[in-house]
Image (cartoon, coloured by chain):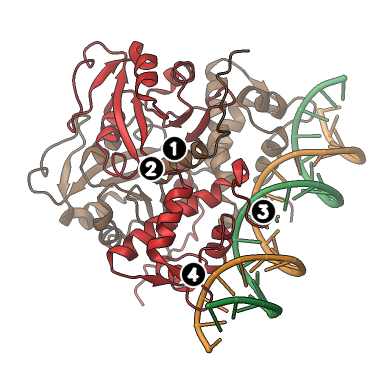
Chain colours: A brown, B red, C green, D orange
Amino acid sequence: MRHPRTPGADVSDLVTSRLSLYLRCLDLLDRDGVATISSLRLADRYDLSSAQIRKDLATFGEFGVRGVGYSVRELRSRLTRILGLDRDLKVVIVGAGNLGMALADYRGFNREGFRIVALFDNAAERIGRRSRGGVQILSISRLAEVARREVVQIAVVAVPAEAAQGVVEEVAKAGIPAILNFAPVQLRVPPPVKLRNVDLKTQLENLAFRLARRRPAQARSAS
Amino acid sequence: MRHPRTPGADVSDLVTSRLSLYLRCLDLLDRDGVATISSLRLADRYDLSSAQIRKDLATFGEFGVRGVGYSVRELRSRLTRILGLDRDLKVVIVGAGNLGMALADYRGFNREGFRIVALFDNAAERIGRRSRGGVQILSISRLAEVARREVVQIAVVAVPAEAAQGVVEEVAKAGIPAILNFAPVQLRVPPPVKLRNVDLKTQLENLAFRLARRRPAQARSAS
DNA sequence: GTTTGTGAAAGATTTCACAGCG
DNA sequence: CGCTGTGAAATCTTTCACAAAC
């Protein structure tokens, strides 16, 4: 059992998150005209661990050349394929408040593998309008229709906490198989649906915790 | 060495993120008028692990009553204290684009322990304006001044990737000890500064990966 | 020479399972 | 009785270190 063709769902999130990171670094290297890079120099340049890079990549195959390193272009295209970014995924955003609108226009969301199809909301005064970037706002009642017609793969949930669980059920019913949730709640999703949370409050609280237990006598670093 | 008063910086992020989660659950329970809860019922209700709840709490002390469980109110106030949310932390946001503006008005950011002091930007046409919620936009050149006067503890970085490293240096120079970064780059921060990343693209790519390696014959769950 | 890919070791985290308390 | 708090076991993740490949 060397390199299973389909390492399936048993690849940890830690690994896949790092693959995204590596891919981003490779983009930068390519832009800088670097053709080949070793795991050691990649690690040096971006504060990573060379052994970890090699282990992570080894999960999916052998992409390097001993004594030389990795071809930037080739590794990039391999990772793109592995991450499933070689075909465009259609995304909808549910919730056209400040955050939903900002996400709809966020660069990086609309590029390289993802396409925002529409925003959905239930407030009559928002429906029919568009985000600055031009994404149209539709009634939530049309979610299932649009999801099936456009074969939407990911729903971004950007509604208030109280409304989120209800939205999840709509999304699941509409056949959308993955959810990126920004609402600060613990959601339950029906089994086939994949869920990831982006929890801004938790992130801030984490920093608060670290700040609260700093060495109290924090020297102004002068020397 | 049972319950060190200051478990210091050696508490893992995994633990502190879960503490935030527990705190949120306790808020809901309190709102529902629940006075006491056992780790088992807490776990059931919110899809957590009861052993993990007990282990996590044990890092900081003994908060429960055997045979009974935890007092919702008391545990909530203990966790609030532990997470450093018993005193308001001042927050600035650097970058008054779509995302920065949305974050400035995001509810949950401005409540319970955090206060947004100002937005900063370098585009002349934005300076002097305000977010919808009323947060004023100042020139980035005033960052250090405001940071020191208001004793700002956290800077949220919401600028394009190319600008982020430069902003980090400004922030560090201004003496702000913690950064929440939304720019899709690997940042380097000077040692005392705490950094957390919220990487939207990586989150989406993670979902893309999971979607790419689903069982190809995905049945429409009907039965 | 250099660098990969990888077993084996070390380290971190989660889960188990139960003694002991209320 | 039920439940916490916790050592011990199981599992997962990272790091080490080197043989094999170029």
The chain containing the residue under callout 2 comes to: A
* Residue A37 place in picture, x, y as percent: 67, 23
Do pointers 4 and 1 mark residues of a single chain?
Answer: yes
**Residues at discs 4 and 1 in contact (Cβ within 8 Å):** no
On residue B198, the disc is: 1
Left or right relative to A55: residue A6: left
Observer-side mark, 2 or 1, equals: 2
On the image, numbered disc 2 is attached to which residue? A200
On the image, numbered disc 4 is attached to which residue? B39
Q: Using the rendered view, name the quadrant where residue A163 is placed.
A: bottom left
Q: Is residue A67 visible?
A: yes
Residue at horizontal 20 percent and vertical 16 percent from the top:
B128
**As rendered, which of B132 and C21 lies closer to the eye?**
C21
Observer-side mark, 3 or 4, equals: 4
Amino acid at the residue labelled 4: Ser
CA–CA distance between discs 4 and 2? 25 Å
CA–CA distance between discs 3 and 4? 40 Å
Secondary structure category for the residue under label 4: helix
Task: Tell me if mark 3 has few (under 14), some (14-19) or many (20+) residues whose alpha carbon lies within 10 angstroms of its own.
Answer: few
Task: Tell me if mark 2 has few (under 14), some (14-19) or many (20+) residues whose alpha carbon lies within 10 angstroms of its own.
Answer: some
Secondary structure category for the residue under label 1: loop
Quadrant showing the N terminus of chain A: bottom right
**As rendered, which of C22 and A123 lies closer to the eye?**
C22
CA–CA distance between discs 2 and 1? 8 Å
Quadrant showing the C terminus of chain A: top right
Q: Earlier in the sequence, mark 3 or mark 2?
A: 3
* Residue A189 place in picture, x, y as percent: 38, 63
On the image, numbered disc 3 is attached to which residue? A4
Amino acid at the residue labelled 1: Val
Residue at horizontal 11 percent and vertical 43 percent from the top:
A126
On residue B119, the disc is: none
The chain containing the residue under callout 1 comes to: B
